[in-house]
Amino acid sequence: MSRPDARTVAVVAALGALSLLVALVVWRRQDILGVALALCCVLLATVAGVAVSAARQGDDPEPADRPGSAAPPTLMPYGVDADTLDALDSRDALRAVRDRKRGSNGFSDR
């Protein structure tokens, strides 16, 4: 048996989630069975969402001439990356950017 297509999985999971949701609304169960049906509904909705995402990703294959992502991420101008800016206080970040722009080693004369 072959593996089902992502669109088929998405449709089946969405229909299953919809049928469980209708069953929950009609039966109005407020016991452990209702909780189990609700959890199954959430699980099927999640599977449907992931399958739709996989189908979209399968429609847009990456170009063959695109280089791999083996290279390290490039730094922002002046050698300060986003993580460093998030970790620093805003004054410290501005001072670091100014110091790198001037070419100093980060030590001040004060």
Image: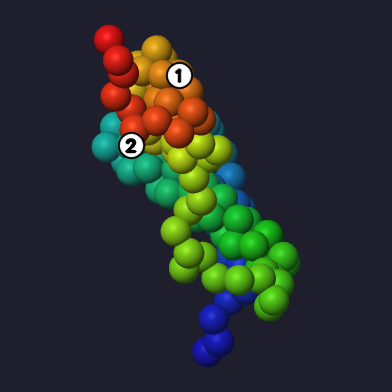
Q: Which image quadrant: the C terminus?
A: top left
Residue 73 location (% of width, % of height) = 48, 53
Residue placed at 30% from the left, 15% from the top?
109
Q: Is residue 68 left or right of residue 35?
A: right
Residue placed at 51% from the left, 51% from the top?
74
Label 1, label 2: how far apart the Cα atoms are? 53 Å
Residue 72 location (% of width, % of height) = 44, 59
Residue placed at 48% from the left, 64% from the top?
71
Q: In this view, does 85 lie to the left or right of 52?
A: left
Task: Give 19 or 13, whichever is nearer the viewer.
Answer: 13
Q: Name the residue under label 2.
A: 35
Residue placed at 53% from the left, 40% from the top?
76
Amino acid type of disc 2?
Val
Residue sitting farthest toward the top: 110
| Crowd band around label 2 with a 10 angstrom C-alpha radius: few (<14), some (14–19), many (20+) | few
Please indicate, yes or no, whether residue 16 appears anywhere in the rendered image. no
| Crowd band around label 1 with a 10 angstrom C-alpha radius: few (<14), some (14–19), many (20+) | few
